[in-house]
Image (cartoon, grey):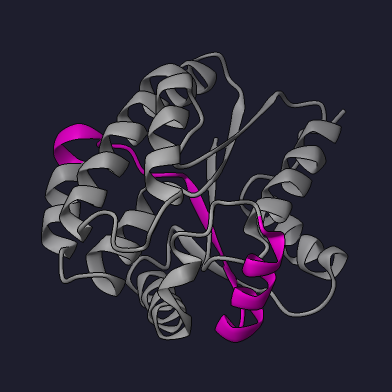
Amino acid sequence: MFISLEGIDGSGKSTQARLLADHIRDTGREVVLTREPGGSPGAEEIRRLLVEGASERWSAETELLLFTAARRDHLERTIRPALARGAVVVSDRFADSSRVYQGTARADLRGQVDRLHALMIGVEPDLTLVIDADPETALGRGKARNAGEDRFENMGLPFQSRLRAGFLALAAEAPDRVRVIDGRGGVDDVAARVRAAVDAVAPAPRA
């Protein structure tokens, strides 16, 4: 099974991806926890180009090409091999981020995003969980990390608000695949909602 977690910057999705991977691993299944951009050696090199530096470093079109290149390497080197051997893949972001970031929030490129995805990727997660968070709260959390990977956070609160609207619209567009998870409350509260959503689709195997 292939599960992705999505959301605006600072929404807590990376923490929730890790906790979900731990939960699935505890049921006896092999789990590959990965991320985008990144998740393979080549994609991690491209990641630095995308998440570091000035916000105006790349146009939305160039970003889309870089993200797609990273995603293709991630798919070839990490995701497909893991699924082929029967592992569960939990990815912190996948193609829906491009649909929202470059497709709607940064520019009106959704058609190009979808065509490029069909041509070069052609894979969707079995389940996508959008961690829905207040943009102002999430932006403060993201900036507080001070990890040097703050290029998108530096685009400001209006950009984060557009991202949130984009993810919610995507969930309405693909209700069979995308579930919105309330990101309010403590980490454990959100983790319980994430586990419930996953277990409803893929219950743990019986001992």
Seen in the picture, residue 121 relative to 9 is either above or below; the reply is above
Residue drawn at x 31%, y 43% is 67
Q: How many marks?
A: 0
Residue 193 among magenta residues: no
Quadrant of the drawing holding the C terminus: top right
At horizontal 82% and vertical 65% (from top left) the residue drawn is 187
Locate residue 50, reporting x and y percent: 38, 47
Check the image and report above or below for 98 versus 37: below
Quarter residue 161 falls in: bottom left
Q: Locate residue 20, reporting x and y percent.
A: 73, 47
Is residue 39 shown to the viewer in this render? yes
Which contiguous range is marked in magenta? 118-146
**Quarter of the picture holding the N terminus:** top right
Q: Quadrant of residue 141?
A: bottom right
Residue 11 can be seen in this image: no
Q: Is residue 78 left or right of residue 32?
A: left
- Relative to 54, is 140 above or below? below
Residue that protrudes farthest toward the front in the picture? 54
Q: Residue at x 35, y 49 (%)?
A: 95
Question: In the displayed structure, does residue 9 sit left or right of residue 100?
Answer: right
Front-most of residues 66 and 176: 66
The residue at the point 19 percent across, 54 percent down is 113
Q: Residue 132: x and y, percent?
A: 58, 75
Write down the quadrant of residue 59 in the picture.
bottom left
Pick whichever, 93 or 137, lies toward us.
137
Magenta segment includes 145: yes
Quick one: 88 or 155, which is closer to the camera? 155
